[in-house]
Image: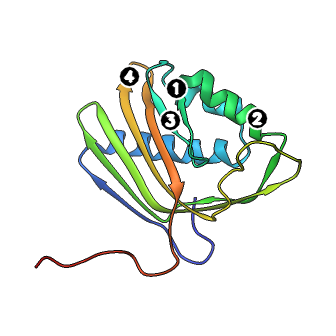
Amino acid sequence: MTGQNTEPVITFDGGSPEDRKALLEAVEDYWRANNHLDIPSLIPLWRDNPEYVFFNSNGFNYQGLKDWLGIWRYYGPRYRCAKEATFGRLRIMIRGDMAIATDEGVNRLYEQIAETAGPPIAGHPVMRSTMAFTKEDDGWKCVHAHFSPASIEGERPWAPED
């Protein structure tokens, strides 16, 4: 997944070369599946536990794989991918059997193709993402995800120390 105008910045902190490769593939596989809300491609990426939470860009929380599949079934017939996701600045930190992948500039865009009474897919083309993974017997699995629009307009609120 490379950017159209700029190459993504991908960095790793910790982990073996094998774990780094596997985690990057898991993140790439997620975004490829997300581009088209491809349910069969999502299922092997997510550890199914109803206690694991996913914070969607629509502002709602979802619990476990059943909820994640439900939201993709909801949005699938209502939206289509107009611009497939590209990484911005992806950082993958690996500590033993846990890993966090953050990206402060995932660039992707959906177009609405059918009416919807519920919240839309976030229309902001630049997203922030955080995904938590655990290493299982069958590979790295996502156990938490948080997606939200990146604010790129206006000045970032910040004040120096006194």
Query: Which secondary structure, mark 1?
Result: strand
Sequence-wise, which precedes: disc 1 or disc 3?
Answer: 3
Q: Do the residues labelled 1 and 3 touch (CB within 8 Å)?
A: yes
Callout 3: 10 Å neighbours few (<14), some, many (20+)? many
Residue 75: % across, % down:
75, 40
Q: Say which residue label 3 marks.
A: 54
Q: Do the residues labelled 2 and 3 touch (CB within 8 Å)?
A: no
101 lies above or below 123: above
Q: What residue type is labelled 1?
A: Gln
7 lies above or below 91: below
Q: Say which residue label 4 marks.
A: 136
Q: In this view, does 127 lie to the left or right of 21?
A: right
Query: Which secondary structure, mark 3?
Result: strand
Q: Residue drawn 82% across and 54% down?
A: 112
Looking at the image, which residue sits at the far right? Answer: 114
Q: Say which residue label 1 marks.
A: 63
Q: What residue type is labelled 4?
A: Glu
Q: Say which residue label 2 marks.
A: 74
Q: Is residue 58 left or right of residue 51?
A: right
Q: Which amino acid does label 3 sit on?
A: Phe
65 lies above or below 111: above
Q: Residue drawn 52% across and 26% down?
A: 63
Q: Which of marks 4 and 3 is in front?
A: 3
Residue 23: % across, % down:
42, 42
Looking at the image, which residue sits at the far left? Answer: 162
